[in-house]
Image (cartoon, grey):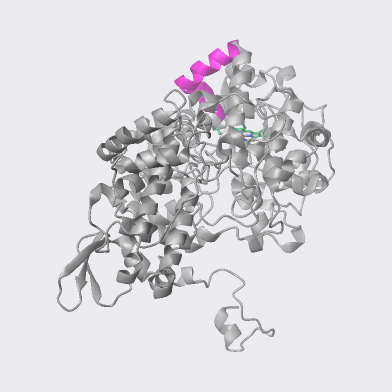
Amino acid sequence: MDGNEIRTGGKCPVMHGAITETGTTVMDWWPKSLNLDILHQHDRKANPLAGFNYREEVKSLDFDGLKKDLLALMTDSQDWWPADWGHYGGLFIRMSWHAAGTYRLADGRGGASTGNHRFAPLNSWPDNANLDKARRLLWPIKKKYGNKLSWADLMVLAGTVAYESMGLKTFGFAFGREDIWAPEKDVYWGAEKEWLAPSDNRYDDVTNPSTMENPLAAVQMGLIYVNPEGVNGKPDPLATAQQVRETFARMAMDDEETFALTVGGHTVGKCHGNGSADLLGAEPEGAGLEEGGLGWMNNTTRGIGANTVTSGIEGAWTTHPTKWDNGYLHMLLNHDWELRKSPAGAWQWEPVDIKEEDKPVDAENPAIRRNPIMTDADMAMKMDPIYREIAERFYQNPALLDDAFARAWFKLTHRDMGPKDRYIGPEAPQEDLIWQDPVPAGRKDYDVAAVKAQIAAAGLSVSDMVATAWDSARTFRGSDLRGGANGARIRLAPQKDWEGNEPARLTRVLSVLEPIAAASGASLADVIVLAGNLGVEKAAKAAGVALDLPFAPGRGDASDAMTDAASFAPLEPVADGFRNWLKKDYVVSAEELLLDRAQLMGLTAPEMTCLIGGMRVIGTNHGGTRHGVFTDRVGALTTDFFVNLTDMAFKWVPKGANLYEIQDRNSGAVKWTATRVDLVFGSNSVLRAYAEVYAQDDNKEKFVRDFAAAWTKMMNADRFDLA
Ligand code: HEM
């Protein structure tokens, strides 16, 4: 049935006029229109626990009781989904890893911190087959601990406790991941329209993994990482090694971490492919409602236990798959391996020759022994020279693997939680780790008013102060809670040299602010923000509005030693619609980049509008250009940007890809120049509606107040100590 049939009183006997299915939305009619929805996800109205403060409440969780219950659950096999060898550890670990492993460094999106694994598309990715069962097995625990335990925390904890129950000394665990209640709308998982479409779609050259489209990290649509059977399903461990290296690097893992994770991951559990994938029903999102939200059901034969089909590969990696031991490297390094097909028809490596007692027993019948297996990615750990060197080293000294794995597992599962101050619970590790971007606490006891007075007397321009504070704060992204003004990393490499930070201007401004910080005891991070606030207040005053921005001291200054310069590279802006700047060789549409950045910063569409309108009249434009200044009164926080944008006295004339002239419609005289980003606020129907609000005569002061609120939100975005 389609919409026309309903409206013409056609075939549908029941009157209903709402669009209850996607497929006929505005975005379908005009696929190129800006998806402002990404700025307004996770509405309070969709949250059944609105007003509930998870991060406070989880502190009173019965941590010990929960852990005991989880340990008991590990070996409490259920008839509806029996545990392999009577232990669910492998399944739960795979669930935790798949929840966390979608994280990618490039934009910080993905990862385990929101519980997104419950929702589409992730709940139905081919690679997540049968993890719906893992979540269902956890339901009694979730039910018991209720609101005090989020799914997001539980899914990561289950894998961590599984490792403990199998004998690994973990590096710790932190609670504090708050659940979302609807699928994320902002995450780009790839352009393919078909699951597991060939890798070639997302590489310029599939033989050169670094050419994978950014910000993607997985090699095919619907996979978390690489294809276990080889590049495009063709076994070749050396080629797979290259893809593993790139994929894990995009998840922020180096060679040793990647090796430790793969080896440690496959030290326990098994692959499932003892049957035919053709007998499986649809994935959860596409399955009939009688499946109760589960997917991949085999309703024709016994498709559980030893007959489960998940990846299609069949077998365990080690002799004792429910024990944390050195069995994986023992198996991998001491046997020759040959390619065979699993019962489900997947490529897998099996030992040419193996002693009977070294084989793992069947997952259900201990009287039968089965061949161990290696995936193509496992073989990469032996065949690739760099991984091989690590393999030999870790095999000789298993304690190295224990430590490397425990640390890498902790990083994998906590990377997107932000700084360690946000960790909750008795087992949260205290050690400073470089990937947490540590920042020491700054002083709060200095005389803020006196410092502000010194800045005011130092003679910096409004534009200098506002632009520097903005550049310091704008790296913040809510996706993994990195970046931001705290730490004043803008004075350290690599940030101080980023083109978008205008190094010459930055050096000049910092040379004024640094002595003020040093003399007062305030951190430079605080002084930069204070200067920005001062600039905004001056601009408001010039527009006739008295403004006294709130300021909370206490930011700290980070050090070079605790800054992993390489991992900051992805935070570099290549475009900043707020500062009206786009790297010259960047071809993506400027307004899409603006939207992406606003989403990462956590701004709503009205907040984004205010900030753009304010920046344009304050005149912070990159390099001091006049593009998009849009006012004759630069430096005053007026509503001129919106007034002039909506005034029919002017016409917009394209002058190149990104530039426009704003001409007087009658005389043709050029008044100002603008960029695409400016004009989107006059042309997009929604953004124009916002622009009109601020162009109205009665909202001049409201604009200043709204700008101030959005500005303050940005300056404090990374003040987790204030939350
Ligand atoms: C190098 C990339 C990796 C590849 C290609 C890969 C591939 C696979 C495949 C094909 C399976 C079988 C799934 C099934 O049929 O049930 C599997 C299972 C598993 N993987 Fe990985 N994996 C990788 C990395 C990891 C990592 C990093 C971890 C955790 C740190 C991990 C932990 C597990 C566990 C515990 C299982 C067993 C699941 C069970 O017993 O039900 N894997 N992996």
Quarter holding ligand 1: top right
- Count of numbered circles on the image: 0
Q: Is residue 155 left or right of residue 367?
A: left
What range of the chain is rendered magenta? 378-396
Image coordinates of residue 418 in percent, x first then y, are 55, 38
Q: Is residue 612 visible?
A: yes
Image coordinates of residue 424 in percent, x first then y, are 68, 36
Image coordinates of residue 269 in percent, x first then y, are 70, 31
Dominant SS of magenta comes to helix
Magenta includes 178? Answer: no
User: Front-most of 400 and 702?
Assistant: 702
Q: Is residue 83 left or right of residue 572?
A: right
Q: Is residue 499 left or right of residue 114?
A: left
Dividing the picture into quadrants, the one containing residue 591 is bottom left
User: Front-most of 286 and 23?
Assistant: 23
Q: Is residue 584 visible?
A: no
Locate the N terminus by quadrant. bottom right
517 to 502, vertically: above or below: above
Q: Residue at x 24, y 59 (%)?
A: 657
User: Front-most of 481 and 340?
Assistant: 481
Image coordinates of residue 536 in percent, x first then y, are 38, 52
Q: Residue at x 38, y 43 (%)?
A: 531
